[in-house]
Amino acid sequence: MAIDFTLNSAQQRLQRIAREFAVEILLPVVKAADEEPDTQRAFHMLKGAYVESYKLGFATGFLPRQYGGGGISNLDLQIVAEEISAVDPGFATVLLVNGLALMPLVWFGSAAQKQKWLSEATCDPRGEYLAGWTVSEGPGTPGGTANFDHPGALPAGIGLTARLDRGRGEYVLNGRKYWPCNSGGWDLQGANVNVCIVRTDAKKGGSAGLSAVIVPRGTPGVRYEQPISKIAHRLCQNNSIVFENCRVPQENAFAVGDGDLVVSKAFTWSGPVAAIASVGVARSAYEYVLAWAKTFTAGSELPILHHQAVGYLLAEVAMKIEACRAFSWKAAHYLDQHDAEGHAVAAMAKVFCGETLFNAVFRALQAMGVNALDRQHPVEKFLREAAVFPLYDAGNVGMQMRKIWGVMLDPEFDPRAIMDSRRIRFKKSMQGAGAVRASPPAARQARPARTKA
């Protein structure tokens, strides 16, 4: 029975290096950066720590070795992500987004594109390289991030358009993006590259009209606005971006007409990472409150951990952390087995762990009572950070649950495939579950019944 939760010697070393980095290099800058009201300055305060993480391979270690990456497995990535997220999940998100942007090139890019862009990502002598995953759009019209796979033409779905100027061999981008991470770069002049999901055919729906386009730093026609100020994950930069007749070479496009598959697979790859990030935050909350409960007496004869209510609370938290770590590892292992084709199980892990551990962090705070509100303790930050997990990374309600549902709707879906670690082939037909296809005609809308006089 090939199930073993024991880390091998290489994984133990990886865990030790990640933990030492998180505690010795990242932790000293987290508090001040988290409290910095200027969101761009807060992000920039992490630059030194980021450079060190780049040197250690954490920023690009998931890329194939042939392009200079570390070639680490999804399971090994779990080990790194938990240790860094235990100190600050916002910083871990900066690293994760490099993968969200660059892994689609691994899966969908041409040989020339991989050689050019992935090699560039892994060979920055300054260690400052950032990649932006530029998918999300703001609310309103069109505001189609959650319904990226909507079958309707514009204005439904993704609204950033890319018109092909065949005479010049360039795509012309117009529109806005809102929420993308890393996109503005260290100076709000752009990340090294932004991988953008665009509408290349305004007349087609999400399953045929979307593509991915690489926008390098310095490309004219892009404006990066002041990053969004958030209640948590404040150490990662989320941008508002305006594209005005931004021109990029046609050769920078990939997955033309299959941008929907890029979005689905990228957020599948990130699902187990987001899941283990929630484990890291809950672990830190649990360990802090446990240590506090072993010394704080609340005026009694013994520390409060000797009270059954507190003991039960923390036992519940500990159980949930262990269960969610196992689920995260299971999902990552499944992706390693099937070339990141684990759309259902990855989404399940992300949804279940994020929501389970938000509650677990709150339960840990209950053990401290009103003392948890005192900001001399770090636990209020743990709760703020935990609130992000159900909402970000293809939000649970907006996209991840729909993805699970779409897989289950397939006539060939085998509910035991995940249990047996058998591959479930993801198809375009699995997308679009729950998307509103059209407003009901006015004539069909319900009207009050009319009575005869």
Image (cartoon, rainbow, N blue to C red):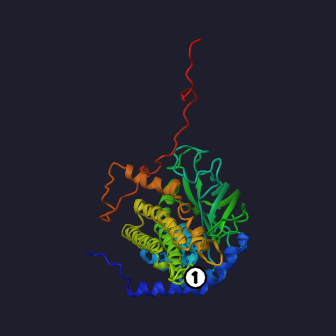
Does any portion of residue 67 appear in the rendered image? no
Who's the residue at 61% across and 74% down the image?
A: 371
The one nearer the camera, 289 or 185, is 289
The image quadrant that residue 172 belongs to is bottom right
Q: Position of residue 234 (x, y in %)?
A: 65, 70
Quadrant in which the C terminus is drawn: top right
The one nearer the camera, 398 or 134, is 398
The one nearer the camera, 422 or 428, is 422
202 over 394 or under it: above or below? above
441 over 315 or under it: above or below? above
Q: Position of residue 4 (x, y in %)?
A: 32, 78
Residue occupied by mark 1 = 53
The image quadrant that residue 89 belongs to is bottom right
Total residue callouts: 1
Q: Position of residue 195 (x, y in %)?
A: 59, 64
The one nearer the camera, 290 or 167, is 290
**Regarding mark 1 in the picture, which secondary structure is present there?**
helix
Horizontal arrangement in the rendering, residue 161 relative to residue 20 (left or right): right
Q: What amino acid does circle 1 point to? A: Ser
- Determine the residue located farthest toward the top in the rendered image: 453
Who's the residue at 57% across and 13% down the image?
A: 452
**Neighbour tally class for label 1: few under 14, some 14-19, many 20 plus, Cα within 10 Å:** many
Quadrant in which the N terminus is drawn: bottom left
Q: Position of residue 369 (x, y in %)?
A: 57, 71
Does any portion of residue 195 appear in the rendered image? yes
